[in-house]
């Protein structure tokens, strides 16, 4: 994915062994309104995006999700994965599209979370064809 994204123009930097740290920040920034018991009930320890699929957080889905992501000002973003320590930092990624992400993600293995540098919004592609993508803004 890194090489493909570089062709689009953004500067891509690998942040090794940062996955757990970024997933915890994602949970703190986007799902802090959920109690520990609510998170346990929806198996958020398995997939963070369950906050959306179990409708605990109101988010955009379907075509609205794609439009919302495309309209975001994207200077700097992070790409993180559910069960992986990979994190990619993208700089100057204003032309990043949903197609760039979905075409370069193994939809059967990876759950991809895109966040802006301040964690004010997130775009999520899941490995489940019937779930997502999701867009959420704090």
Image (cartoon, grey):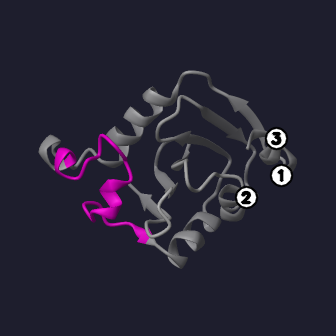
Residue at horizontal 32 percent and vertical 66 percent from the top: 58
Residue placed under numbered mark 3 in the picture:
3
Callout 2: helix, strand or loop?
A: helix
Do the CB atoms of the residues marked 1 and 3 lie less than 8 Å apart? no
Q: Where in the figure is residue 113, as x and y percent of width and height?
A: 52, 48
The residue stretch that appears in magenta: 39-60
Q: Which residue is outermost to the top?
A: 17
Of the pair 83 and 97, the residue shown nearer to us: 83
Name the disc covering residue 8, or none. 1
Residue at horizontal 35 percent and vertical 41 percent from the top: 27
Q: Which residue is outermost to the front?
A: 108
The quadrant in which residue 11 appears is: top right
Taking the image as shown, residue 132 lies to the left or right of residue 55, namely right
For discs 1 and 3, the disc positioned in front in the rendered view:
3
Q: Which residue is outermost to the left?
A: 37
Mark positioned earlier in the residue sequence (3 or 2):
3
Q: Where in the figure is residue 39, as x and y percent of width and height?
A: 21, 46
Mark positioned earlier in the residue sequence (2 or 1):
1
Q: Which is the main secondary structure of the residues drawn in magenta?
A: loop
Q: Where in the figure is residue 74, as x and y percent of width and height?
A: 65, 52
Q: CA distance from mark 3 to mark 2?
A: 12 Å
Decide: few, some or many residues near mark 3? Use Cα within 10 Å; few <14, some 14-19, many ≥20. Answer: few
Callout 1: helix, strand or loop?
A: helix
Name the disc covering residue 100, or none. 2
Q: Where in the figure is residue 93, as x and y percent of width and height?
A: 73, 49
Decide: few, some or many residues near mark 2? Use Cα within 10 Å; few <14, some 14-19, many ≥20. Answer: some
Q: CA distance from mark 1 to mark 3?
A: 9 Å
Of the pair 99 and 126, the residue shown nearer to us: 126
Do the CB atoms of the residues marked 2 and 1 lie less than 8 Å apart? yes
Mark positioned earlier in the residue sequence (1 or 3):
3
């Amino acid at each position: 994915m890194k090489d493909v994204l570089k062709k689009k123009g953004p500067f891509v930097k690998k942040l090794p062994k940062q996955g757990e740290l970024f997933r915890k920040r994602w949970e703190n920034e986007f799902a802090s309104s959920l109690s520990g018991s609510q998170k346990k009930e929806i198996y958020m320890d398995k997939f963070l995006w369950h906050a959306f699929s179990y409708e605990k957080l109101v988010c955009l889905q379907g075509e609205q999700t794609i439009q919302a992501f495309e309209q975001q000002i994207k200077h700097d973003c992070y790409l993180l994965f559910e069960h992986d320590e990979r994190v990619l930092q993208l700089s100057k990624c204003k032309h990043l599209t949903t197609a760039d992400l979905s075409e370069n993600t193994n939809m059967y293995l990876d759950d991809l979370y895109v966040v802006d540098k301040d964690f004010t919004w997130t775009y999520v592609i899941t490995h489940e064809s019937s779930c997502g993508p999701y867009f959420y803004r704090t």
